[in-house]
Amino acid sequence: RKEVEQDPGPFNVPEGATVAFNCTYSNSASQSFFWYRQDCRKEPKLLMSVYSSGNEDGRFTAQLNRASQYISLLIRDSKLSDSATYLCVVNIAGGSYIPTFGRGTSLIVHP
Amino acid sequence: DVKVTQSSRYLVKRTGEKVFLECVQDMDHENMFWYRQDPGLGLRLIYFSYDVKMKEKGDIPEGYSVSREKKERFSLILESASTNQTSMYLCASRAGDSSTDTQYFGPGTRLTVL
């Protein structure tokens, strides 16, 4: 079983919709969590870190549920420019913090 | 802004050739990583380095080696390229080993092995 799992999608939503993705992780030693965004044929870029208390950045809200071992990303008022693949990243404690990536969730926002 | 650069955006090599992929970061980051990304498989860690001359194997090190002689530069070497090494290769750097440190990626090298 992969350590970090995401629904690959695609999630196909109209502009203005609210959409949410979940990401589950299996290693309870996971320490820190991030969402990255990757546009087609480009490199991943940090979207936001995920804190235990939850955090919001404009239209984006990230939540962490340690008891159930998942993180979520909520996008409100979707824009065409939100179309991308969203990667969940979990840092697992070890000698060094090794980032483990989910395979990504594809979002397509249409007019 | 952190800048991570990779030596080539596109590369075409023949089976059996030795291939060097170079990555340079300009922010004095301690940690550097090499990944490959394939459709349906996501990013898979090949090697990472937490300091100069230090390296650790990732999930798929077979067929690859790395070199980190200077802090800013991390090289990935394919000793004898094979067709199954055709992929997108992404380099990343990270300031240090704090759990909250985030990675910054280079633009990627799309390698085709014929």
Image (cartoon, coloured by chain):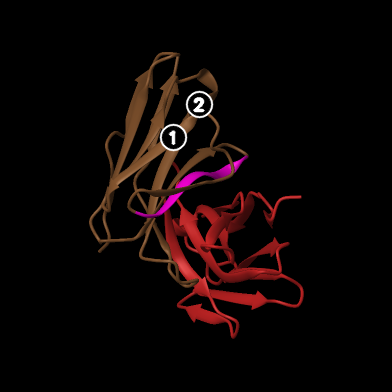
| Residue closest to the eye, B113 or B31 | B31
Q: Amino acid at mark 1?
A: Ser
Most distant residue in the bottom direction: A53
| Coordinates of residue A84 in the picture (x, y in percent) | 50, 52
Q: Secondary structure at mark 2?
A: helix
Give the percent coordinates (x, y) of residue B109. Answer: 37, 35
Identify the residue under disc 1: B65
As rendered, which of B111 and B17 lies closer to the eye? B17
The answer to whether residue A94 shows anywhere in this view is: yes
Q: Residues within 10 Å of mark 1 (few under 14, many from 20)?
A: some
Q: Is residue A42 visible?
A: no
Quote the CA–CA distance across marks 2 and 1.
13 Å
Residue B26, compared with residue B114, is above or below; it is below
Q: Which residues are magenta?
A: B41-51
**Chain for colour brown:** B
- Indicate the chain coloured red by its letter: A
Measuring from the top left, give residue B53's x and y in whole percent.
35, 48
Q: Nearer the viewer, mark 2 or mark 1?
A: 1
Type of amino acid at the residue the image marks with label 2: Gln
Residue at 53% in and 37% down = B61
Q: Which residue is mark 2?
A: B85
